[in-house]
Image (tube, grey):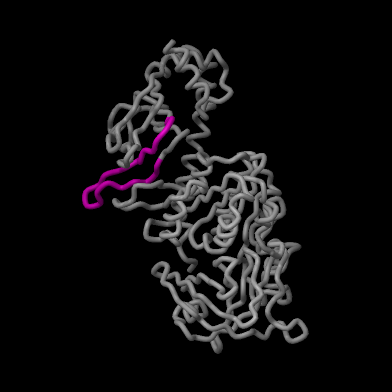
Amino acid sequence: MEINGMEAIVRNHPLFKGLDEGFVETMAGCAKNAVFKPGSYVFHEGDDADDIYLIREGRVALEIAAPGHGRMVFQTVTTGGVLGLSWLVPPYTWRFDAHVRDAPGNSLRAVVIDATCLREKCERDPVLGYAVMKRFMPALVERLHDTRVQMLDLYRAKD
Amino acid sequence: MPKIDARPAPQSDPHADPMVPVLGRVLARRQDLSDIVSLDVEVDGWQGFAPGQFNMLSVFGVGEVPISISGPMSDRTRIVHTIRDVGAVSHALARMGPGAIMGLRGPYGMPWPVARARGRDVVVVAGGLGLAPVRPVLYHILENRDDFGKVTLLYGARSPKDILFASELSDWRGRLDLGVEVTVDRADASWHGHVGVVTALLRGADFDPAKTTAFVCGPEVMMRFAAGGLVDAGVAATEVFVSMERNMQCGIGLCGHCQLGPVFVCKDGPVFDWATMKPLMSVKEL
């Protein structure tokens, strides 16, 4: 029952819409639900990137802490988004902190996919591996594009 | 009630010289942000405007600039202009207080086609000062709320202290019949909202692409990506509208400075549909 419920959740997440049913089953087999309280951390910089977080509801801030600067939020990820892509590439460690926004009612609900489990399955089944890459690469490219646009500082007054 | 997509006649006598302004008197001044000011201006016989139109505002002895009208169409007692202090003329305008006199020609330009959006979902995407030219659309929608489907405003600013009309946005967020999401490019420790580009907000917005009309206003790069994002989401390119701002100097299609390929931004725009503007925007140095 739990796996069937998880299949439906995986199938309906925007990242996996239209995914082959066999792959949905495989992903669901590595997945579980999780809830993170407002103000808590999903992971910290330097932690092992052994999980993938598909945001079902809520908002999480991506932060980097630096002496003299405090905690600097450079992006937020919200409902329907995917948190964390560092699990894709070695050394599989997170490069920032993921901080659940501290606002009333802003618990973060996520599907957590065991990235170690998924990586092993992708190694054994390259067809699955390619299907997974095709799903996550657009998110990676989009994140890169958004970051570049942010860097352009478009709203400043023209010189 | 006049059709709001029709353009009201400019205030100047069409038989006289169209470059001669009428006089406008400043009624009130508001400091919106450190470099942005809103002026309420009174003009005798003002016949109103359509959202998206602009006036040519002149400071005698200094010069003339095009400034969008940012107030409600329903109030004909005053014309609201929101001005960024960035050049000689805008600096002079921004320093004006109640009682000051300016020159005014207009209103000019093709407006946002709000009537076309009746019965449809509406998505407004604005960035920075771009919220000002599109604010009259929101006023009109809220004054006629039952005429429209789901309405969403997505607004991006440089930082929390650069959020334009913050108090109004906060009031609008409190409404149950309007979706408002605000994001900033750079956050400080006091900011608990979205951080990132405004186009990222599109992915979580609630609208039916097949029956959505979108109005997009802000820096050109932002408009390109926002319009592209809307089309990728399934909104027809003919239902996405952008407001251009390119070197308008006469406002009436005479000087040619704002020519953009086959169109004049002042006369054929500043509002264009994305299907028309996309190929022109992609020509570098045009």
Figure disc tally = 0
Q: State left or right for residue B95 relative to residue B66.
A: left
Residue at image location 44% in from the left, 10% down from the top: A1
Q: Quadrant of residue B112?
A: bottom right
- Farthest residue in the top direction? A1
Q: Is residue A122 visible?
A: no
Q: In screen coordinates, is A86 left or right of A44? A: right
Q: Nearer the viewer, residue B31 or A134?
A: B31
User: Which quadrant would the N terminus of chain B be assigned to in this image?
Assistant: bottom right
Measured from the top left, where is residue B249 in percent x and y?
A: 64, 75
Quadrant for residue B24, please give it.
Answer: bottom right
* Magenta-span inclusion, residue A84: no
Whether residue B62 sits left or right of residue B255 in the image: it is left
Most extreme residue toward the left is A67
- Point out the residue furthest to the bottom here: B61
- Specify the quadrant that holds the C terminus of chain B: bottom right
- Asked if one can make out residue A69 in the rendered structure from this viewpoint, the answer is yes
Q: Is residue A70 magenta?
A: yes
B205 or B142: which is nearer to us?
B142
Judged by its main secondary structure, the magenta piece is strand
In the image, what residue occupies the spot 67% across and 39% down? B210
Position of residue B120 measured from the top left corner of the image (x, y, whole percent): 65, 46
The residue stretch that appears in magenta: A55-76
Q: Quadrant of residue B259?
A: bottom right
Look at 26% across and 44% down and name the residue there: A65
Relative side of B4 to A112, left or right = right
Q: Compared to B182, does B42 lie above or below?
A: below
Direction right: furthest residue = B15
